[in-house]
Image (spheres, rainbow, N blue to C red):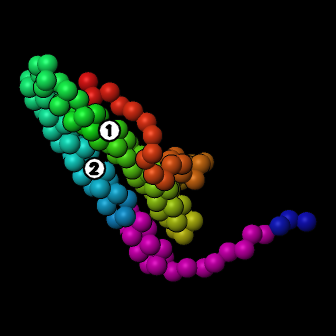
Amino acid sequence: MQQTLPSVSLPVSLVADLQDSLLMAMTDLQRLEGLLDHATSNLLERFGSANQALGDLGGDRGEELISPIRHSLHQAVTELQFHDMATQLIVHTGKVLQSCAWRLADQAMEPEDGEVPLELDPMPERPSPVTQSEMDAGSIDLF
């Protein structure tokens, strides 16, 4: 006995609108990734400048005063690991959205005569590439 999967009939215009919405969301995520990259790059540059300025202040008594500031800078840079985690989530979510959009198109629209069927990228296997929900530990060397 052959099993049939349940199906839902949707108007092509609805599927096209949904696909457009998914692709717009994917574009917004790509823009967000660019904004995060830019902000993180600026932050790293400013932390580097601050660390260099602290090094220029040196001296015997100066190093005693500078050490806690340098430690705080190192901790702040460690917090920038958030950028890496956020970027991984954005890329993952973009892949899921793109896969959904192409699958919708593939299922809802019949290929035209002579049209080569879409080769769909597989849906990401893991639900999320990032398991942490907050930054509590870790280290990054400033230089």
Q: Amino acid at mark 1?
A: Gln
Q: Is residue 84 magenta?
A: no
The mark found on residue 75 in the picture is 1
The mark found on residue 15 in the picture is none
Establish if 20 lies above or below 65. Answer: below
Q: Is residue 59 left or right of residue 135?
A: left
Using the rendered image of the protein, determine whether residue 22 is visible from the camera's viewpoint: yes
The percent position of residue 77, horizontal first and vertical second, equals 29, 38
Q: Secondary structure at mark 2?
A: helix
Which residue is farthest right?
1
Between 69 and 75, the one lying in front of the other is 69
The percent position of residue 90, horizontal first and vertical second, equals 40, 52
Q: Residue at x 60, y 79 (%)?
A: 9
Q: Quadrant of the C terminus?
A: top left
Q: Is residue 60 left or right of residue 8?
A: left
In the picture of the structure, the residue carrying the numbered disc 2 is: 36
Q: Secondary structure at mark 1?
A: helix
Q: Residue at x 25, y 34 (%)?
A: 68
First in sequence: mark 2 vs mark 1: 2
On the image, which quarter does residue 53 sit in? top left
**Which residues, given as a range, are shown in magenta?**
4-23
Q: Residue at x 86, y 65 (%)?
A: 2
Q: Using a 10 Å C-alpha cutoff, classify the residue at mark 1 as few (fewer than 14 neighbours), some (14 to 19) or many (20 or more).
A: some
Q: Quadrant of the N terminus?
A: bottom right
Main SS class of the magenta portion in the image: helix
Distance from label 2 to label 1 (Cα)? 19 Å
Using the rendered image of the protein, determine whether residue 120 is visible from the camera's viewpoint: no
The percent position of residue 16, horizontal first and vertical second, equals 43, 72
Q: Amino acid at mark 2?
A: Leu
